[in-house]
Amino acid sequence: MYDIIILKEGYTHLEPHGTLRACGSITLLKGPRHNIIVDTGNPWDRETLLQGLGAQGLKPEDIHYVVCSHGHSDHIGNLNLFPAAVHCVGFDICRQDEYLLHEFKQGIPYEIDEDVEIWPTPGHTGSDVSVLVKRTNLGTVAVAGDLFECEADLDCPGLWQENSERPHLQQQSRIAVLDVADYIIPGHGPMFQVPPEYKKQMRVIMIMEEHYSSSDMTTRTESPGVQPDDASTSQPTPTSQPKPHVSISP
Ligand SMILES: [Zn+2]
């Protein structure tokens, strides 16, 4: 069973003079077969990471996989602490200069082992991933990067849409993750339990419609079901049955 240890809780604070202080969550998945870091904070988090690992009796070379949910600067700042690990950054999977050709774009998850899968969950950027950890003592936990900004964004779509490159696509990814996760570690807030009503897609869509009915038509073009080029732009969300894949050994 994997232990889930939040080494740093992500945050976003608006400062009085108009700047934003933000950093992504850093999470350690400590398991029987692999040790995995999901997101590495920003470059100033190096000591936090080292100390957090040390408290778990781990060194950087004990980490087998480093997954960065996407390429923004507050998530990828310490990749070079882990030269021995397999790096999964967005849709790229590599070990040193060897890249694995994995079809995240086709909606196919990458299975690290029987308990941990990396799902393509694009929208915040074009190539976001989330890490799904199954059979933990909390059930299924999704370490989701900025797919979810924080718990409050469930009822307040503006919180995640503000920073979304593709809100319609992100919405599909969110629904897929809400459907399977019991708990979510968001990019910029504490871990939260998925409320039962969000297990049903209807609640999410209702919230979206409430939101869009108070927005203008420019925003509306991105709302569910009215994307003009749905078929060409949307990517399939992952199925619960991942297809076979080739893997890179850590
Ligand atoms: Zn981001």
Image (tube, rainbow, N blue to C red):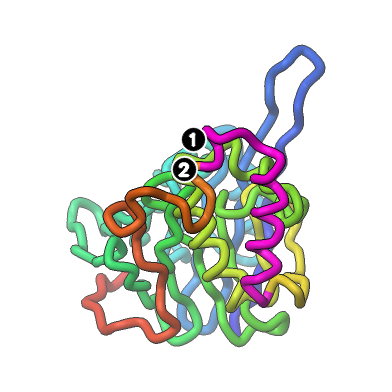
> Is residue 145 left or right of 127 when viewed as pictured?
right
Residue identifier under label 1: 73
Q: Is residue 12 above or below residue 68?
A: above
Count residues near mark 2 (Cα–Cα under 10 Å), then give few for <14, some for 14-19, many for 20+.
Answer: many
Residue identifier under label 2: 76
Q: Amino acid at mark 1?
A: Ser
Residue drawn 45% across and 45% down?
166
From this viewpoint, which residue is outermost toward the right?
16
**Magenta residue check for 26:** no
Q: Position of residue 55 (x, y in %)?
A: 69, 60
- Label 2, label 1: how far apart the Cα atoms are: 6 Å
Q: Amino acid at mark 2?
A: Ile
> Is residue 171 left or right of 181 when viewed as pictured?
left
> Is residue 85 left or right of 205 when viewed as pictured?
left
User: Which residues are drawn in magenta?
Assistant: 199-220
Q: Is residue 148 above or below residue 140?
A: above
Residue drawn 32% across and 52% down?
233
Q: Quadrant of residue 44?
A: top right
Instruction: Say whether marks 2 and 1 touch (CB < 8 Å).
Output: yes
Q: Position of residue 150 (x, y in %)?
A: 71, 51
Quadrant location of the C terminus in the rendered image: bottom left
Q: Position of residue 232 (x, y in %)?
A: 27, 54
Can residue 86 be seen here? The reply is yes
